[in-house]
């Protein structure tokens, strides 16, 4: 009886939080769905009406959507490759006994605590500026012409900025998993004649499989919605060269004032993100059950 009363009390105490969270999620979703079927323009809010699926048709057939979709895939896959490979490399380095090991670990992880807007401004003005950036200074010293990174290689520049931000996260997760590796297994493999390469591929890498899968899952969810870095640096340009789906929705809503079309784009983005998340969750589940 006491246990039953405790459960009822727990449910009663959790109910307000659950209701608030439910309303917080459902109300914006319902409004987005509603506006996605409306012909609603901020410049002419009076003459609005039912648009049906025309907003979805316009968004999906717009050439900018195809370019933004490809850019989103390239950005996500490239950052994942850089952070996973770089994270494994840095985790292996941090696992070695060196002088000032604690300070080095803090310095490696510190970029993850910098706000995306601040990080993008630092890269834009201090590193990639073709006139007085550090990259331009190094190129001049080496006898090369400075490169206007954000103008000539906009998407590659965004990939570098985002990868720099997420590399510490991947390093931290992989390094934590590496710390749980039994040293006796490595010593036994070494005694059996396994070299450093075989030790990595047959002992270390399989042990890190779950951590790598978790990194890919979490990063993918966030990388599909990269926005601040694009807004601060390239503005999605030149043209749509560095525009992803999240920035395209913003552009359509607040620059083109087309709330209906932007809402349809937001729904499409949510559906695509959920499809990717669904398959990634299944991959994580298989790895955890293995």
Image (spheres, rainbow, N blue to C red):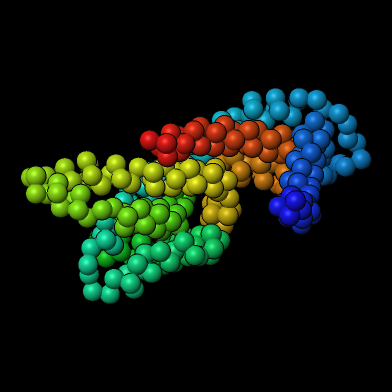
- Tell which residue pokes out farthest to the right in this image: 46
Residue drawn at 48 percent across, 43 percent down: 217
Q: Is residue 206 left or right of residue 264?
A: left
Q: Is residue 117 left or right of residue 50?
A: left
Residue drawn at 57 percent across, 57 percent down: 232
Quadrant of the rendered structure where residue 91 is?
bottom left
| Front one among 196 and 187 | 187
Residue drawn at 30 percent across, 45 percent down: 207
Compared with 164, 239 (above or below) is: above
Quadrant of the rendered structure where residue 104 is?
bottom left
Compared with 86, 271 (above or below) is: above
Quadrant of the rendered structure where residue 68 is?
top right
Is residue 267 visible in the rendered image? The answer is yes
| Front one among 177 and 11 | 11
| Front one among 246 and 108 | 108
Give coordinates of residue 165: x percent, y percent. Answer: 45, 57
The image quadrant where one finds the C terminus is: top left
Is residue 257 visible in the rendered image? The answer is no
Q: Is residue 145 left or right of residue 256?
A: left
Give coordinates of residue 210: x percent, y percent. Answer: 39, 43
Give coordinates of residue 254: x percent, y percent. Answer: 72, 48
Residue drawn at 18 percent across, 46 percent down: 199
Give coordinates of residue 111: x percent, y percent. Answer: 44, 63
């Amino acid at each position: 009886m006491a246990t039953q009363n405790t459960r009822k009390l727990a449910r009663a105490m959790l109910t307000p939080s659950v209701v608030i969270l439910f309303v917080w999620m459902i109300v914006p979703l319902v409004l987005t769905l509603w506006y996605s079927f409306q012909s609603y323009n901020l410049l002419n809010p009076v003459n609005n009406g039912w648009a049906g699926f025309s907003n979805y048709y316009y968004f999906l057939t717009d050439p900018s959507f195809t370019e933004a979709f490809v850019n989103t895939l390239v950005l996500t896959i490239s950052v994942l490759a850089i952070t996973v490979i770089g994270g494994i490399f840095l985790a292996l380095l941090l696992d070695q006994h060196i002088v000032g090991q604690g300070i080095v670990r803090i310095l490696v992880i510190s970029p993850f605590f910098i706000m995306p807007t601040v990080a993008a401004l630092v890269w834009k003005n201090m590193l990639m500026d073709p006139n007085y950036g550090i990259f331009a200074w190094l190129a001049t010293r080496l006898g090369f012409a400075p490169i206007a990174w954000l103008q000539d290689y906009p998407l590659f520049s965004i990939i570098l900025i985002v990868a720099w931000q997420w590399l510490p996260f991947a390093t931290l997760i992989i390094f934590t998993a590496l710390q749980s590796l039994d040293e006796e297994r490595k010593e036994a493999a070494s005694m059996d004649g396994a070299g450093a390469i075989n030790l990595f591929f047959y002992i270390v890498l399989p042990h890190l499989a779950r951590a790598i899968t978790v990194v890919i899952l979490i990063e993918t969810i966030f990388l599909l919605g990269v926005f601040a870095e694009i807004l601060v640096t390239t503005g999605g340009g030149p043209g749509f060269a560095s525009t992803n789906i999240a920035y395209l929705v913003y552009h359509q809503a607040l620059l083109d004032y087309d709330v209906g079309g932007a809402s349809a784009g937001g729904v499409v983005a949510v559906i695509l993100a959920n499809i990717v998340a669904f398959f990634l969750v299944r991959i994580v589940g298989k790895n955890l059950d293995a």
